[in-house]
Amino acid sequence: MSIFIKGGQTVTNKLGFWSIVLLGINTILGSGIFLLPGSFYIALNERGVFPTLIVIATVLSISLCFAEASGIFEGYGGPYIYVREAMGEFMGFQVGFMKWVISLLAWATMAVAFADLLVAFLDIAHIPYIEKILAGLLIVILSYINFLGVELTKSLNNIVTLGKMVPIILFVFIGIKYMGKSNLIFIARDPGRLITGIADPILILFYAFTGFESIAVAARDMKTPLKNLPKGIISVMIGITILYLILIFSILGVLGGNIAPDSYPIFHAAYLLLGPLGGSFFSSGIIVSVIGINIASSFISPRSIVALSEKNTMPEFLSRKNKYGTPGAAIILTGGLSLLIILIGNFNTLASFSVISRISQYLLTCIAVIIFKKRGIKGSLTLPGGYLVPIIALVTMGILFYNYLIYIVTVFLIFFLIGRYFYSYDNNK
């Protein structure tokens, strides 16, 4: 008997509003903010808060565009659906295919981050290939849990999200009083360097916010997504932004100028604030946090390719549901390819490539929102100001990433050519 059944089966256990919020937190709050290096905080002190405010304005305006689009369309795919409806099937396929590949890279990156952190925490680096083994086991276990149904994944996601927030909230509660003691300045010491040269710190901070675009990918597994998704995305991004600002300014207040460029200041600050026992507890929370973002990746990544399969631009069997109501074949394929990636990639390389490769999705989704507004297409959320928010997103992205233009274009062309091959192959069958 086949384990796959036709995709029309209704999943009774779906994500409600608060589960969507927790999924969003898990999708974003991972290793990025915790592994911000000392060079970021040094650059923040040298150039003032302006670069950080530009990142926040960019991220919030992009996420608002995703929130508006998510209130118009429901179904698997997220950015794939938005771009397809605005620019046609071919461009939609390109974005959908790109989204799936990026999700593979992101999941592999987070699995490797989990393994590296756990190995360092347990001091077991002497065991041969232990990082690869742990990363692989995590992917296999989470794929199996995801295969067994939405309810099990939802419960695990909720428990881990709440668990990882405990040490973070403890750090914020104790560290917030140090914010006023920060050496942070609001105007760059050297105004000529306000924008020039901030590329690396900007890329690092922007990476900490990535993942919000994935929340809408699994819309079909959510209750009343047209209503809940826009509110969920906005709630998640506002909460994450406030949390990040408190963490960053608290660390600056605690450490001041005693920050080494190659260090990870949040660990140092945690040990100073919480003591050795509290510092170990906080480090454990970071590991749980990375497990959480892996859970979110295991749930979202397979749904990216399901959306393409449902439109017959990828093999039909990938969108079939198994007896547990989940896309079993897509889960197996996604987990298997992620396993291969952890064998050939390291954390730093995969993380950098992940950020650069996401920019095309952001640009095209913001343009899609402009097209929807021009056509008079409205959903459950309509952003005020007409075209203002998507234009702000496009302009601020240009300011932040002009130093990476050649890399962004190169990555887009690579994805475009590979995607064109698959799209042409499917249409010529």
Image (cartoon, rainbow, N blue to C red):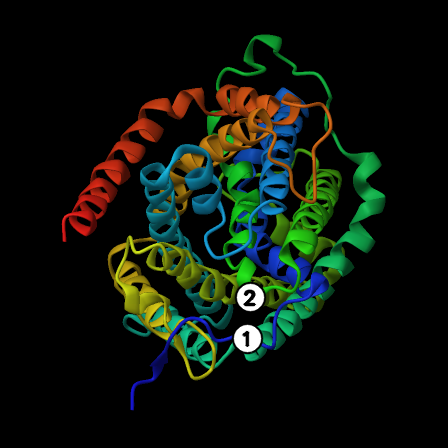
Q: Is residue 404 placed above or below 422 in the rendered structure?
A: above
- Is residue 347 visible in the rendered structure shown here? no
Picture quadrant of residue 343: bottom left
Residue 130 position in % (x across, y down)? 34, 72
Given residues 420 and 400, the one toward you in this image is 420
Left or right: 388 as drawn, with respect to 183: left
Residue 106 against residue 238 in the figure, above or below: below
Q: Which quadrant would residue 154 be assigned to in this image?
A: bottom right
In the picture, the disc for residue 286 is: none
The residues bearing labels 1 and 2 have C-alpha atoms spaced at a distance of 7 Å
Which dot marks residue 11? 1
Front-most of 429 and 44?
429
Residue 388 percent coordinates (x, y): 65, 21
Give the residue drawn at x 53%, y 34%. Answer: 39
* Residue depicted at 56% across the width and 56% down the height: 27
Q: Earlier in the sequence, mark 1 or mark 2?
A: 1
Residue situated furthest bottom in the rendering? 1
- Camera-nearest residue between 157 and 231: 231
Tell me the SS state at disc 1: loop
Q: Are marks 1 and 2 in contact (CB under 8 Å)?
A: yes
**Could you tell me how many numbered marks the image carries?**
2
Q: Where is mark 2, residue-wise?
A: 221
